[in-house]
Amino acid sequence: MKFSMQKNGFSGSLPFGDLLVSSDENYGFRPYQLLVASLAVCSGGVMRKVLEKMRMPAETIEINVKEVTRIEEEANRVAKVHLHFVLRGSIDEARMPKVMELTRKNCSMVQSVADSIEVVETYEIR
C-alpha cells in the first residue's frame, strides 16, 4: 500500500481502486471517517460469519454509527464510537449476547483499538 501527497491530501492506489484521504472532506475521506468505517464494517463482517456459523444467517445487517466522541485537547483523537446493528432474519434473541461477544472478540479492528477507543455495540432485531 502506498500513498502519495496531493494538493489537498493524499491518494492511494489500492487493489480495489483509488482512495483519496484529506483533512478536508471536500477533497476525500477524513482519516477518522476511515477509522470509524473500519470498526463498523469489520464488526459487521465478523457478526455475519458468527450468525452463519450459529445457523441463523442474517437477511441484512445495517450498522448505524450512533456516536463518535473526539477529544479536541488530545489532537482531536477518537475516544468513543457507538455502533448500533440492525439485524433482519430468523435470529434467536436469546443467543445475541454470545453473538455480540464473539463479534467483539474476533474483530481485528476493534481489538486493535481496545486500549485506546471505547467501542460500544448495541443491536436490535427487526
Image: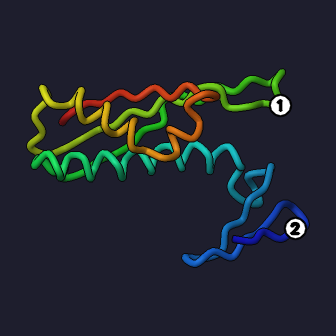
Residue at image x 19%, y 44%?
Answer: 88
Image coordinates of residue 46 in percent, x first then y, are: 34, 49
For the residue pair 7 and 42, the one nearer the viewer reads as 42
- Badge 2 marks a residue whose secondary structure is strand
Residue at image x 64%, y 28%?
Answer: 116
Q: CA distance from mark 1 to mark 2?
A: 21 Å
Can you say which quadrant of the picture contains the N terminus? bottom right
Left or right of 85? Residue 21 is right
Residue 9, by quadrant, is: bottom right
Q: Give the residue at mark 2.
A: 5
Left or right of 20? Residue 53 is left
Image coordinates of residue 98 in percent, x first then y, are: 23, 31
Mark 2: few/some/many CA within 10 Å (<14, 14-19, 20+): few
Left or right of 40? Residue 3 is right
Identify the disc placed on residue 17.
Answer: none
- Name the residue type under label 1: Ala
- Badge 1 marks a residue whose secondary structure is loop
For the residue pair 121 and 104, the one nearer the viewer reads as 104
Residue 20, by quadrant, is: bottom right
Residue at image x 12%, y 39%?
Answer: 91
User: How many numbered dots are placed on residues in this image?
Assistant: 2
Q: Give the residue at mark 1.
A: 75
Mark 1: few/some/many CA within 10 Å (<14, 14-19, 20+): few
- Disc on the earlier residue, 1 or 2: 2
Can you say which quadrant of the picture contains the C terminus? top left
Left or right of 59? Residue 63 is right
- Name the residue type under label 2: Met
Instruction: Look at the numbered discs 1 and 2 and tell me whether their residues touch, using CB distance below 8 Å.
Output: no
Image coordinates of residue 37 in percent, x first then y, are: 54, 48
